């Protein structure tokens, strides 16, 4: 997909734009991205506590960075999540609870992404996207909110499932029964989504683009939904396509949109590579 984009729109203008990026802005974006992952490790620890898992924050930070490093080499985010669950589960001899904590962490991250995108679609002014895109974004956010509010009902239904399915559902029950206990993790997830938008705003400033922050608060969450699909390595190609469509509608030139996405991919790659130390120094429990 990335090759088709660069071939169809001519790679030279996009690559020329990439070369214009100012190192200080790029470094700031990488630093903010890594800081967001550190915060995400704390969010995961909060959710693991709900499932009865212990361990210090440093342990969760190590496993989170191992997962982040793993995600550089597998489609989507499934590989890194599986690595986190295996490391934590074997360490505490509670693999089922560890899997549930990782699923809750990923699920709440997606909920926050949907809510953040929907809130931006309703509140952001000055950035014109098609009404259909805005309406669909708001509808997904509302559906996610209704699903979240219905979790206590789902917890009661889970108890009536056949025994084999009930045992699996019981692992998720702590997260379904008390939605209020998830609020601190949700707040951290919303902060993370905002930080990712700011990362790309910094990259745009490094390119010399005069684009309002509101455009990134609106377009980046929608693009991230598509980039999270397990289609390509770390969303490469999918993200560029979404950027090209959304940012073009927001008034950004095609070459600038592709360059911005390539720079963000490079920033996340460098950020993910910071997990190599944890990966090579941490033994599988």
Image (cartoon, rainbow, N blue to C red):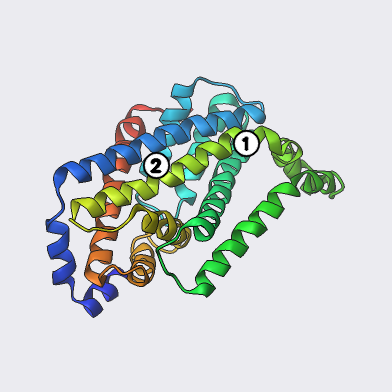
- Counting the numbered discs, the total is 2
Q: Position of residue 243 (x, y in %)?
A: 35, 65
Classify mark 1: residues with Cα within 10 Å, few (<14), some (14-19) or many (20+). Answer: few
Labels 1 and 2 touching (C-beta < 8 A): no
Q: Residue drawn at (31%, 69%), measured in percent from left and top?
A: 251
Q: CA distance from mark 1 to mark 2?
A: 24 Å
Q: Secondary structure at mark 1?
A: helix
As drawn, the label of residue 92 is: none
Please, is residue 37 above or below residue 117 in the view?
above
Q: Quadrant of residue 210?
A: bottom left
Taking the image as shown, residue 28 lies to the left or right of residue 38, namely: left
Please, is residue 191 above or below residue 116 in the view?
above
| Residue placed under numbered mark 1 in the picture | 183
Taking the image as shown, residue 94 lies to the left or right of residue 229, namely: right
Q: Relative to the observer, which residue lies in front, 47 or 162? A: 47
Give the farthest residue toward the right.
160
Residue 245 visible in the picture: yes
Q: Relative to the observer, which residue lies in front, 103 or 256? A: 256
Which of the two marks, 1 or 2, is nearer to us in this view? Answer: 1
| Residue placed under numbered mark 2 in the picture | 68
Taking the image as shown, residue 278 lies to the left or right of residue 258, namely: right
């Amino acid at each position: 997909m990335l090759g088709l984009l660069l071939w169809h729109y001519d790679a030279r203008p996009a690559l020329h734009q990439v070369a214009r990026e100012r190192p200080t802005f790029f470094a700031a974006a990488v630093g903010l991205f890594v800081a967001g992952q550190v915060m995400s490790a704390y969010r995961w620890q909060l959710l693991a506590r709900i499932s009865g898992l212990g361990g210090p924050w440093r342990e969760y930070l190590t496993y989170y960075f191992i997962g982040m490093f793993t995600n550089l080499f597998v489609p989507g985010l499934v590989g890194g999540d599986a690595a986190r669950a295996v490391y934590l589960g074997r360490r505490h001899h509670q693999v089922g609870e560890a899997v549930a904590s990782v699923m809750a962490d990923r699920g709440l991250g997606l909920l926050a992404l949907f809510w953040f995108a929907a809130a931006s679609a309703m509140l952001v002014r000055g950035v014109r996207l098609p009404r259909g895109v805005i309406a669909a974004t708001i509808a997904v956010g509302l559906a996610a909110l209704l699903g979240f509010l219905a979790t206590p009902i789902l917890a009661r239904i889970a108890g009536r499932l056949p025994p084999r399915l009930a045992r699996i559902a019981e692992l998720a029950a702590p997260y379904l029964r008390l939605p209020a206990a998830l609020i601190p993790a949700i707040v951290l997830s919303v902060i993370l989504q905002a930080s990712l938008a700011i990362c790309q705003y910094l990259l745009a400033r490094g390119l010399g683009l005069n684009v309002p922050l509101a455009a990134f608060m609106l377009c980046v969450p929608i693009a991230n939904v598509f980039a999270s699909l397990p289609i390509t390595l770390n969303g490469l190609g999918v993200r560029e396509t979404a950027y090209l469509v959304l940012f073009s509608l927001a008034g950004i030139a095609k070459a600038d949109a592709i360059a911005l996405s390539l720079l963000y991919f490079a920033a996340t790659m460098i950020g993910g590579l910071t997990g190599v130390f944890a990966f090579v120094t941490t033994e599988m429990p």
